[in-house]
Image (spheres, rainbow, N blue to C red):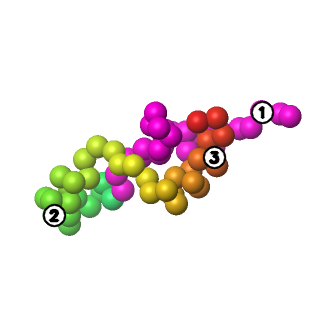
Amino acid sequence: MPKLKTKSGVKKRFSLTAKGKVRSAQAGKQHGMIKRTNKQIRNQRGTTILSEQDARIVKKFLPYG
């Protein structure tokens, strides 16, 4: 069998934790910060863990992750 290719877009945007959960950047932080409340901006720092449903989709594109 040939090797499976990893989706290069997914490779750049997501990473896996040691337990196999999918870590990603916080959504809604690219632009328009004036409209957001300070609480929203504060809570969107760093990274977040995707939900199981979303993680299942991302893991399909990371065959060896």
Q: Quadrant of residue 17?
A: top left
Residues drawn in magenta: 1-27
Residue drawn at x 55%, y 44% is: 10
- Disc 3 packing (10 Å; few <14; some 14–19; many ≥20): some
What amino acid is at disc 2? Thr
Please name which of the two marks, 2 or 1, marks the residue nearer to the observer.
1
Q: Nearer the viewer, residue 22 or 5?
A: 22
Q: Which residue is mark 3?
A: 61
Q: Position of residue 41 (x, y in %)?
A: 20, 55
Q: Is residue 59 visible?
A: yes
Q: Which residue is mark 2?
A: 37
Q: Mark 1 is on which residue type?
A: Lys
Q: Earlier in the sequence, mark 1 or mark 3?
A: 1
Q: Nearer the viewer, mark 3 or mark 2?
A: 3
Q: Is residue 32 left or right of residue 65?
A: left
Residue 33 x %, y %: 22, 58
| Amino acid type indicated by mark 3 | Phe
- Mark found first going from the N terminus, 3 or 2: 2
In the rendered image of this protein, does residue 3 appear above or below residue 55?
A: above
Residue at figure coordinates x 30%, y 54% from the top left: 29
Residue 20 within the magenta-colored segment of the rendering = yes
